[in-house]
Image: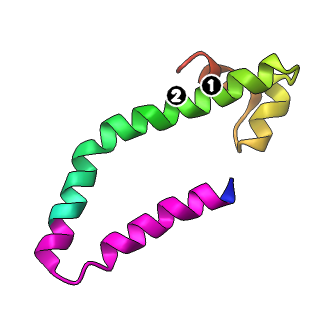
């Protein structure tokens, strides 16, 4: 898991490392334009993971704290809220 998060951070650092300010701004603008769709996809990945963990027998009260949220919130995530 940490590797995936670090890969995203590395991609952000790569944007910061673009030397030409206009190229850096254009690349960042492109990412920001795509962010709503990427954000939706990230939420779906998390939702499916919570659903899978719950289907394996874990309660939302067990899942929530591991994700830094309450059990009630984990249940909401599973329902797509």
Q: Residue furthest right?
A: 57
Q: Residue at x 64, y 60 (%)?
A: 3
Residue 19: x %, y % from top left: 22, 84
Residue 8: x %, y % from top left: 49, 59
Q: Which residue is mark 2?
A: 44
Q: Is residue 39 left or right of residue 74?
A: left
Residue 77: x %, y % from top left: 61, 25
Residue 73 drawn above or below residue 29: above
Quick check: can you spot residue 45?
Answer: yes
* Part of the protein shown in magenta: 3-25
Residue 74 drawn above or below residue 9: above
Residue 81 drawn above or below residue 5: above
Q: Quadrant of residue 6?
A: bottom right
Q: Are marks 2 and 1 in contact (CB under 8 Å)?
A: yes
Q: Secondary structure at mark 1?
A: helix
Q: Which residue is mark 1?
A: 48
Q: Is residue 9 left or right of residue 1?
A: left
Quick check: can you spot residue 72?
Answer: no
**Residue 20: within the magenta?**
yes
Circle 2: is it few (<14), some (14-19), or many (20+) Cα within 10 Å?
some
Q: Residue furthest left?
A: 22
Q: Residue at x 22, y 45 (%)?
A: 33
Q: Is residue 10 left or right of residue 54?
A: left
**Residue 53: within the magenta?**
no
What is the total number of numbered labels drawn onto the structure image?
A: 2
């Amino acid at each position: 898991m940490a590797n995936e998060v670090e890969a995203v951070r590395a991609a952000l650092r790569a944007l910061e490392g673009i030397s030409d300010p206009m190229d850096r701004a254009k690349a960042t603008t492109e990412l920001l334009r795509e962010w709503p769709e990427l954000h939706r996809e990230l939420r779906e990945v998390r939702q499916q993971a919570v659903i899978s963990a719950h289907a394996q027998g874990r309660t939302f009260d067990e899942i929530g704290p591991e994700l830094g949220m309450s059990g009630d919130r984990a249940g909401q995530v599973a329902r797509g809220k």
